[in-house]
Image (tube, rainbow, N blue to C red):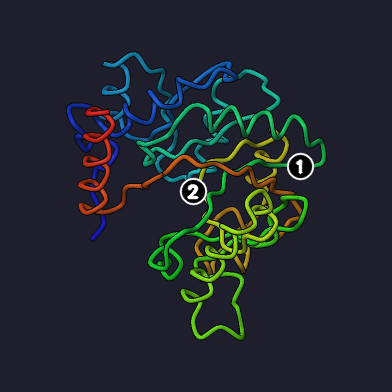
Amino acid sequence: MRLPGKPLVDLLGKTMIQRVWEGAREATLLERLLIATDDERIANVCSSFGAEAVLTAPELPSGTDRIASAYQITGKQYDIVVNIQGDEPLLRGAVIDDLLRGLAATPNASVATPIKRLTNAEDLSNPAVVKVARDKTGRALYFSRSAIPFVRDAESQAEWLTYQQLNNQQLDNQQSTTQLFWKHIGIYAYRTPTLLRFQELKPSALEQAEQLEQLRLLEDGAEFLCVETEVEFVAIDTPTDVERVREILRTRTIQ
């Protein structure tokens, strides 16, 4: 069951959109932070806690289109634009800083995006958890809702995940090169020409099949730099997600 009006969902006394904004504000490398929305109610709530909001057209087909539109509405020039999903209330600013540093250090990359080691079989088989396969330099090869890569000779992909975790414990500092399964976090630091290029492209065949808009740019030849993070993210889509995030926030408060 989807969650209507989710940016305004209450998470221990603060709306979800405020939680995301506060996490993003922790970043030290952002020059400007604004919230793009097509809903005046959300814009008004954002203003109430001090956030800058910009209203975009309701008919825009994707979040990336909305970010590109908001960028153009500002009338300012920036080298990099970060797309922060509004349903990631556990966001930490350090993740954004890591993306910006990674992109700055990798001139050939078009986009930087975070990935996290995938550690449980439930996430591996869950189509709502996006997986990514990458090359040895950290570039994304493909994003999918399926478990990738598929391990042909394993009894199951979950069994292989368990085996790999045990193997990695013995390899210590070689984990990054031996890890097969990665979860993709939907935050993107775009070089501005790449973001604007997205608007020019029609939805691609792979994008439509997987319902993953980042595949549009990947098919077009954009290079996605995958930046590892240990931060735990829980995107909110259902009432169950809300309760899970509330419990995590309660634990943080106690600590």
Q: Disc 1 designates what residue?
A: 109
- Residue 197, how many percent across, how many down? 70, 43
Q: Quadrant of the C terminus?
A: top left
- Residue 3, how many percent across, how many down? 24, 51
Q: Amino acid at mark 2?
A: Ser
Query: Which residue is outermost to the right?
Result: 108
Query: Which residue is outermost to the top?
Result: 50
Q: Residue at x 57, y 62 (%)?
A: 181
Is disc 1 placed on a helix, strand or loop? loop
In the picture, the disc for residue 62 is 2
Q: Nearer the viewer, mark 2 or mark 1?
A: 1
Q: Nearer the viewer, residue 21 or 57?
A: 21
Decide if residue 23 is on the left or right side of residue 203. left
Neighbours of disc 2 within 10 Å: few (<14), some (14-19), many (20+): few
Q: Residue at x 54, y 43 (%)?
A: 64
Q: Quadrant of the N terminus?
A: bottom left
User: Relative to 18, does residue 60 appear above or below in the rendering?
Assistant: below
Q: Residue at x 53, y 28 (%)?
A: 94
Neighbours of disc 1 within 10 Å: few (<14), some (14-19), many (20+): some
- Residue 84, how many percent across, how many down? 49, 36
Decide if residue 167 is on the left or right side of residue 217. left
Pick whichever of labels 2 and 1 is earlier in the sequence.
2
Q: Residue at x 19, y 34 (%)?
A: 10
User: Relative to 107, does residue 151 appear above or below in the rendering?
Assistant: below
Is disc 2 placed on a helix, strand or loop? loop
Q: Amino acid at mark 1?
A: Ala
In the picture, the disc for residue 178 is none
Q: Nearer the viewer, residue 125 or 255?
A: 255
User: Do labels 2 and 1 touch, CB within 8 Å?
Assistant: no
Q: Nearer the viewer, residue 53 or 28?
A: 28
Q: Nearer the viewer, residue 117 or 224?
A: 117
How many numbered discs?
A: 2
